[in-house]
Image (cartoon, coloured by chain):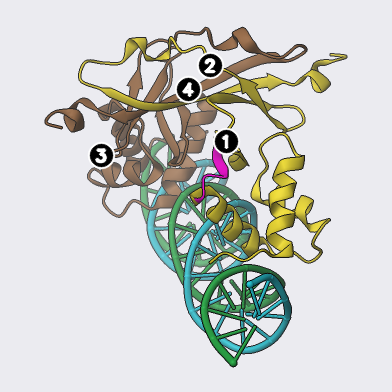
Chain colours: A yellow, B brown, C cyan, D green
Amino acid sequence: MTRDTRQKRAIRSAFERANRPLSPEQARSEAARESAGLGIATVYRTVRSLLEDGQLSLVDIPGRGTYYELAGKGHHHHFACEDCGAVFELEGCNSGIYDRLPLGFCTRGHDVTIFGSCAGCSRGR
Amino acid sequence: MTRDTRQKRAIRSAFERANRPLSPEQARSEAARESAGLGIATVYRTVRSLLEDGQLSLVDIPGRGTYYELAGKGHHHHFACEDCGAVFELEGCNSGIYDRLPLGFCTRGHDVTIFGSCAGCSRGR
DNA sequence: ATAGGTGCAAACAGTTTGCATGTAT
DNA sequence: ATACATGCAAACTGTTTGCACCTAT
């Protein structure tokens, strides 16, 4: 039902190569090195089907829009560098986060983004 | 330099009345009760100037876009109800969050959203 | 009177969809 | 051969901007 095309291979391997979240446009330009002329609509369609397949997961960075990353890495959060714009994965999660929920609320998940400067950008500041 | 208009009063008081974050469209329809025919562009312009003034702050809810709330409430986070769509403020912040930053990274802020069911929606489930 | 504010529509960015063509099966 | 996938352009949503008109000062 789903065909193995040059474009899909290129997109999947762009996410495998990058070990951090990519925006649709970043994914397109990375994947285009392997599949010239790749259209952005194909990226969106492929990303969506990989999402539904559980092969990718969605990463929403406040103020920066939607990124995607390889799924299956376990629960973790993200770091957005305010200097160079890159988004990184942070391992693990210290959740004292749920302690203060108001009465009657129940929780199904959470989302944490840390902002600052990455190692490359904070060096020499 | 900044004039006191019916529209601005209506928008500001919409945020004062709501004690939770509002999307631009929610703000428009709330404020329109006090200022009929209010245009969405005016909401965006007013919200932006209130932001710059420090009277509002921006709340980005992953997967749901941009909301705004009255500023000056101290550091806190948000809860997004997956059933009714409402966004709530949560008091305080349990930050063990920074413990795991990779070497060389430095932090300037963070953003936490909790997803689940609010008290109204989880009652009777 | 006049500068700043407003509503409308056009312009934009990001994302989705329709359609004719291309291609894996 | 055929059905799914692709690229392009049009459509959509959320947000911003230009402009003629309006209004607080």
Label 4 packing within 10 angstroms: few (<14), some (14-19), many (20+)? many
Q: Nearer the viewer, residue B85 or B67?
A: B85
Structural distance between the alpha carbons of marks 1 and 3: 24 Å
Judging by the rendered image, the residue that carries numbered circle 2 is A93
Residue B113 inside the magenta-drawn segment: no
Give, as a three-letter code, the residue at label 3: Cys
Q: Residue at x 20, y 20 (%)?
A: A104
> Which of the 4 image quadrants contains residue B10?
top left
The range drawn in magenta is A53-59
Asked whether, in this view, residue B1 is left or right of residue B22, the answer is right
**Disc 1 sits on a residue from what chain?**
A
Say if mark 1 contacts mark 3, CB within 8 Å: no
Q: Secondary structure at mark 4?
A: strand
Amino acid at circle 4: Val
Circle 3 marks a residue in which chain?
B
- Label 2 or label 1, whichever comes before in sequence order: 1
The residue at which mark 1 appears reads as A63
Q: Secondary structure at mark 3?
A: loop
**Residue topped by disc 3:** B84
Depth check: A1 or B115 in front? A1
> Between tags 1 and 3, which lies in front?
3
Task: Name the residue carrying label 4.
Answer: B112
Residue B55 visible:
no
Q: CA distance from mark 2 to mark 3?
A: 27 Å
Q: How far apart are the two marked residues, 1 and 4, measured between alpha carbons? A: 13 Å
